[in-house]
Amino acid sequence: MTLRFLAAVAAVATAASAAAAGPLTMTTRMMIEKRVTAADGSTATQLVPANKAVPGDRITVVLAYRNTGTAPIGSLVLANPVPRNVLYRGSAAGSQTPELSIDGKTFGTLAELRVTTPQGATRAATASDVTHVRWRLSSPVAAGQGGELAFQAVLK
Amino acid sequence: MLSLALLLSTMANVHAETRAGTLITNVAATKVRGTEGDWIVSSNPATFLVVERLDVSLARIDDAAVTVTPEGVAIPFVLSNGGNGTEAFDITATLSDPTARIRLIAVDRDGDGRFDPAVDTALNPARTPRLEPGESLRLIAILDPATPDVTVAALELAARATTGSGPEGTVFTGRGDAGSDAVTGQTGAIARLVVPIGPGRSPVPVLAKSQTIRAPDGSANPVAGAIVTYRLDARFAAATAAVRIEDPIPAGTAYVPGSLMLDGARLSDVTGDDAGNADAAGIAVTLGDIPAAATRIVQFQVSIQ
């Protein structure tokens, strides 16, 4: 397996293009739930690409990955810090459920996480406390294959 | 029939909202375990801009009876920027008849409810300074008699966002903070306040709406699944005939069946069996004739979709 180190990529990446020239590419996009009213008065929810949003809008953060190399890639851990001013709400339908963290270090289910209050006490973590999500892929990604992962959030 | 249909349905800023013009950026990273160690691959940054939502509310500071005296009377009120951007507001004041006139609208800098030219600032034109998100400004309107016999029954105040106003969802492209778009919120970026005036007669009932939010996580964040309890305080300063209170269910929310209450007693959602009825479109409570000064309280709940 050959993998080139791509630490500098984040600084030069543009919003429109996937940021990798190596065998693994990752592309993220944010979608917003828009409620649209049909002619018969019924309403439905559509996901549209987010280029603007108002506080309270529901956002789906999507992460697409693909192995563009010729060998399988194993032990993939895809991590996504929850953007500032965005509150985690839950796993998106159809996506593998992510592991959650409130400090970027310890990951688990929400029920396993506890928040230390300024007074030194602890309380159960809520979805709004989540600062990072990550997905650990259980099987290697074959050459030419990829997938999508997603979580739901809301703009504060 | 007097219908008090509430147009002002304020989703108050119960939490710190993201300011208009903020860029929200998402970057993901992958850790790949290779034979020579771990490699980090980063994604592209996905970004969007936070739009300026325009909302405003007006409220009286007290419920004191207002009489226009020969030396003039000051009416204190408060304007709140309910949006997530900095915004100035134009204020208009209208009297129900020309027997009195509006001397000025001023910022009540010392908050004493009176106009002191040495301290308070008259607004001419009646435009507020730019207010921060959630900021409130105390104001006063001063009325003088225009004729010996003042018969004015009400002062109507209105405040309108200078960026623009209109039905919820009206967009002003590129006119929000930091180049963002601006869009009107549930108030339509316009607020109205009617102040009854006159000794012993107060024909204009006051309907005040407030809300509390309870989210599934126990917080007061207005997120999907949160229950909003609305409370309508209908204050009648005098006998009032054939009163009916109506309030539409705000867009993006759903009425919680069976949640309609009048003065603490539950009403059914069905039309005709009691004073209230409710459906997906709105609630209505028929109070009928109010014989004397009274306050009636209507409550109902919606869930945020």
Image (cartoon, coloured by chain):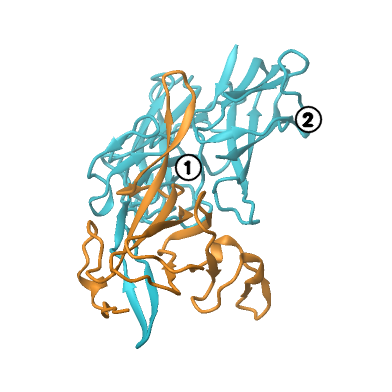
Chain colours: A orange, B cyan
Q: Which mark is residue A12?
A: none
- Picture mark count: 2
Residue type, label 2: Arg
Of all residues shown, which one is farthest toward the bottom? B36
According to the picture, the residue beneath numbered tag 2 turns out to be B266
Q: Identify the residue at horizontal 43%, vertical 73% (top origin).
A: A74
Please tell me which residue lies in front, B287 or B95. Answer: B287
Left or right of B244: which side holds B184?
Answer: left
For disc 1, the neighbor class at 10 Å (few under 14, some 14 to 19, many from 20) is: many
According to the picture, the residue beneath numbered tag 1 turns out to be B77
Does residue B252 lie above or below A23 as drawn?
above
Does residue A92 lie above or below B281 as drawn?
below
Residue A88's spot in the image, x, y percent?
Answer: 50, 59
Q: CA distance from mark 1 to mark 2?
A: 34 Å
Residue B207 showing in the rendered view? yes
Does residue B104 lie above or below B194 as drawn?
below
- Chain letter of disc 2 in the image: B
The N terminus of chain A sits in image quarter? bottom left
Q: Identify the residue at horizontal 58%, vertical 21% (top origin).
A: B203
Residue A125's spot in the image, x, y percent?
Answer: 62, 67
N-terminal-most mark, 1 or 2: 1
Q: Identify the residue at horizontal 70%, vertical 26% (top origin).
A: B293
For disc 2, the neighbor class at 10 Å (few under 14, some 14 to 19, many from 20) is: some
Kindly state the secondary structure of the residue where label 2 is placed. Answer: strand
Please tell me which residue lies in front, B280 or A8. Answer: A8
Kindly state the secondary structure of the residue where label 1 is placed. Answer: strand
Q: Identify the residue at horizontal 39%, vertical 26% (top origin).
A: B94
- Chain letter of disc 1 in the image: B
Residue B136 showing in the rendered view? no
Residue B32's spot in the image, x, y percent?
Answer: 38, 76
